[in-house]
Image (cartoon, rainbow, N blue to C red):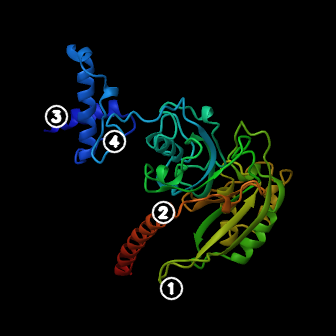
Amino acid sequence: MEEASSLASSLFAVLYPGEAYVESSESSRERLASRLAQIAESISPQHSNKKSRRDVPQTRRGGGRPSEDRGPDFAACPYAYVALRIAYFGWRYYGFARLKDIEETVEGHFFNALRRGRLIPPEADPLELDYSRCGRTDKGVSASGQVVALKLRSVPEGRPPLDYVTIINRNLPEDIRVLGCSPVSESFHARFDAGGRHYKYFFVQDGSYDLVAMNRAAAAFVGEHNFKNFCKTDDSVNTYVRRIDRCYIEPCATTYGAAGDGIGPMCVFNVQGSAFLWHQVRCMMSVLQSVGKGALPVSSVEKYLDLDRQTSRPQYTMAREEPLLLFRCAFDGNLEPEDFSIAPSARTKVVAHLTTMARDLRIKHQLVMEVLEGIR
């Protein structure tokens, strides 16, 4: 039985690339059996004496499409150029961008979902789809407002549009979700048309941080500066000058956990700017944390931004990647958050999905607290 199941799974993978064979699914077994029967018929010596398959309606249980489900003819399909807003929890991924020899990237899973949903050709190259992304977040970094743009299979005029959000989410891992979709002009570019990015970095105020000092130091980041001492250098970068529009620390509007649990309230470092260098936000946060703990004076930020005074990158350890969130990508009126639409049914599913995730994390938090209280 195991050998037969393995053979069936292998045959299904060949006949239906990108789809998973579910042994317990009657639909999977019916599709495979029907397809194999058609192949056997087509190569049998008596095939020429039989009716053409076109003359014999092929239906599966419940009617509808033929049991030979080859998918759409991508060469004949119309396409729509759309922007998608994507959220992901990057803790287990090697960054957003696809990597040649590493499967666990957010973008890799995103493109696999597009293929399984038959929204792009199986072997499509992103360049052929005019693909662009707003941000290239690093390993472990999350996002609630990542934006990408590309061409997706559409439908002829007069037919109901495809629900891209539902189709893609159905094929994504649980920690990646599309939150909305918006049609855009073919000249739109998710990276070069972005007027700014807003990052958030979360930390616990355990009583050791002087938030007033941190905010005074953070104010020095505002404006246009050379951030070479606040990033990981990259030979491909032409200039290290970047503009910061806002930079401040505040308590989180919504926090979770019991007051007085000994953990401390959550705070967030907000930084908004035109664009950011490799590891820039984490480097900025590291220096601010040292200022908050009294290890560095408030004037350190101003000093490190002055390359005449600080000629080489100061010695500090970058802040951890997991608390960093790409909160929003701004497009200067060309594409506002409200422009990303989501069908009510898709929104309900996303809300329910995220609520379940939050509930599971709350349970894990309580488990840790029980162990902590036990040893205290």
Q: Residues within 10 Å of mark 3 (few under 14, many from 20)?
A: few
Query: Which kind of residue does numbered mark 2 sit on?
Result: Ser
**Number of the label disc, if any, that sits on residue 259:** 1
Nearer to us: label 2 or label 3:
2
Are dots 4 and 2 in contact, CB under 8 Å?
no
Q: Position of residue 365 (x, y in %)?
A: 42, 72
User: What's the residue type where badge 4 is placed?
Assistant: Ala
Q: Earlier in the sequence, mark 2 or mark 3?
A: 3
The residue that mark 2 highlights is 345
Q: CA distance from mark 4 to mark 1?
A: 46 Å
Nearer-N-terminus badge (1/3) = 3
For marks 2 and 3, give the CA distance.
41 Å
Residue type at numbered disc 3? Glu
User: 48 or 13, which lies in front?
Assistant: 48
Q: Is residue 367 above or below residue 189?
A: below
Q: Are marks 2 and 3 in contact (CB under 8 Å)?
A: no
